[in-house]
Image (spheres, helix red, strand yellow):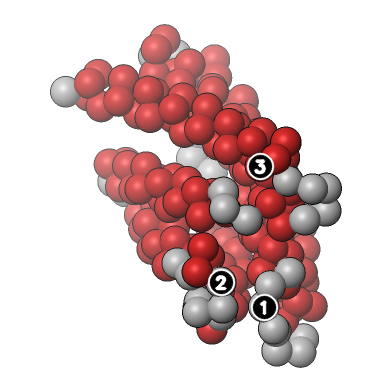
Amino acid sequence: MKRVFGLFEAVFDLCYLAAALLMGAWLLLSSPPGGPGWVAGIMALVLAGGDAFHLLPRIAVIFTGDEETYRPALGRGKQVTSITMTVFYLLLWQIGLMFFSLPEGWTVAVYLLAGVRIALCLLPQNRWQDRYPPVFWGILRNIPFFLLGAFTAVFFFLNRNVLESLGWIWLAVLLSFVFYFPVVLWSRRNPKIGMLMLPKTCAYQWMLAMCLSL
């Protein structure tokens, strides 16, 4: 059964990366430079490129069973993914700014939160390549990330009726964090909770799909 779930995860991850890359390429090629569709294309490629640093070593572990060999790549991949996910939300925020009004000071707060998150991800105390990195640092670096997600979800919720194609972005953002939160807190105690990353990934795909009509 474990083998079956491993193969399912590997196929799912490969399909996700391929879909994100294809959507990113299509958006870039079909949109005028600097426009919202073009920014969405960059956003998709940043997401897929960053996630590939973690998912490809993860797939290699699934097929070889050799976690020790790939642990450095897995750890570094998690670090890269943590940073590119933050950049993803900054790009999504910029897309929102192209269409919606915004309370004064929100963008400053969002960029400050993103800067703090990235700075925390770069600190050696995270010990990314350890078998069991410190939970405290996992929680600490995710506090500004959760706040960044909250700002983004509220921003798109308040403007959900302005542009129909982006009307459900707020829900996709909210769901991505609902699935991610238990992984941060409890996946060490129960590794099966890590499977919540699959629906979290689907939420990201939904965001990209909503951007296809920009």
Q: Nearer the viewer, mark 1 or mark 2?
A: 2
The quadrant the C terminus occupies is bottom right
Image quadrant where residue 20 sits: top right
Residue at 39%, 19% (x, y): give it. 62
Which residue matches tag 1? Answer: 100
Name the spot of residue 204 as percent of width and height, x first: 49, 50
* SS for callout 3: helix
Drawn side of residue 199 relative to residue 103, left or right: left
150 lies above or below 59? below
Q: Which residue is mark 3?
A: 27
Nearer-the-camera pick, 14 or 115: 14
**x, y (%) of residue 213?**
57, 53
Query: Residue 23, how many percent across, how many down?
Result: 58, 38
| Crowd around label 2: few <14 · some 14–19 · many ≥20 (10 Å) | some
Q: SS of the residue at dot 2?
A: loop
Q: Amino acid at mark 2?
A: Leu
Q: In the displayed structure, would residue 25 be above or below residue 61?
A: below
Residue under label 2, please give it. Answer: 163
Q: Quadrant of residue 198?
A: top left
Q: Secondary structure at mark 1?
A: loop
User: Between disc 1 and disc 3, whose residue precedes?
Assistant: 3
Are the residues flagged by discs 1 and 2 in contact, CB closer than 8 Å? yes
Going by the numbered disc 3, the residue's amino acid type is: Leu
Residue at 73%, 46% in the rendered image: 31
* Real-space Cα separation, disc 1 to disc 2, in angstroms: 9 Å
Query: Which badge, 3 or 2, is on the more N-terminal residue?
Result: 3
Label 1: how many Cα within 10 Å (few below 14, some 14–19, many 20+): some
- The residue at the far left in this view is 1
Q: Amino acid at mark 1?
A: Phe
